Image: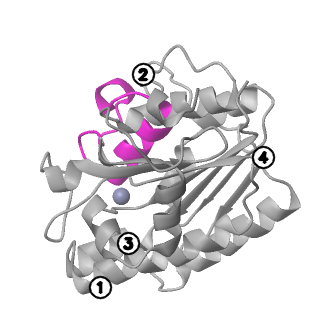
Amino acid sequence: MPATESVVLFVVDGMRPDGLQQAPTPNADKLVRDGASTFTARTVMPSSTLPCHTSLFRGVPSERHGVTTNTWSPPVRAVPSIIDVVHREGGMTASFYNWEQLRDLSDPGSLNASFYVDNCGDPGGDTQIAEAAAAHMERAMPTFSFVYFGRTDIVGHDTGWMSEQYIDAIGGADDALGIVLGAVREDTTVILTADHGGHDKTHGTTAPEDMTIPWIMRGPDTPAGDTIDAQVDIIDTPATICALLGIAPSDQWTGKVVREAISG
Ligand SMILES: [Zn+2]
């Protein structure tokens, strides 16, 4: 049986792997040292925020879920999200985010707690999200939590991906990450990833800079310091979370379990 009792999924919007490597990120660096990671995971096309998050949560590529812009539309054939599946299995779920379009990452009735503030344009916005998440987790750790930091993408669009300001924003996201990690228990598995990368002042294309994302996992079931050699795709995330929690994945998902990141 897995030792993981709870999972926290962190997304730093638009965080490129090489940006993460350049920025001062002591909290993410510690996750890499203590967990399993790859800096060559792949997102889906179009490499835009809502399509990529929909694949991240619903375990299928865009062609299947049909969300190809940042405007939500329900899939023609329903496909549950990781939030729906964990909730259906009796788990507690929570979402903390500062970009409102992410309200549709689960079906109505599946979230036990949700915190949204429209502040991803504010320098301190991600910190407020992190503090809300940490306070909630200290009261009662949900089985599955989503924590989203949106500022990095805003700065990328303003000043360019890999600009000095963008690298600083990744450092800011790492500070926010640290706030939440302070509330995370030993039997919690943490996943840190991004929805997409970016180039110049944009993203959404098939360019490797847009499509390549970091994928880092640390927890009681994860081998420490392991580099994941297999190709990880963003759609693999929900099946992997189910494997960690010991619950059945949706039969609609086409993503696989990232076995290399799970010990034994
Ligand atoms: Zn994004």
Asked whether 123 or 167 is in front, the reply is 167
Question: What amino acid is labelled 2 in the image?
Answer: Val
Q: Nearer the viewer, mark 3 or mark 4?
A: 3
Q: Nearer the viewer, mark 2 or mark 4?
A: 4
Query: In which quadrant of the rendered image does the N terminus lie?
Result: top right
Lower sequence index among marks 2 and 4: 2
- The picture quadrant for ligand 1 comes to bottom left
Circles 2 and 4, Cβ within 8 Å, touching? The answer is: no
Residue 76 numbered tag: 2
Up-down relation of residue 61 to residue 217 (above or below)? above
Q: Which mark is residue 152?
A: 3
**Which mark sits nearer the N-terminus, 3 or 4?**
4
Per the image, the residue denoted by label 4 is: 112
Are dots 3 and 4 in contact, CB under 8 Å? no
Location of residue 60 by image quarter: top left
Residue annotated with mark 1: 165
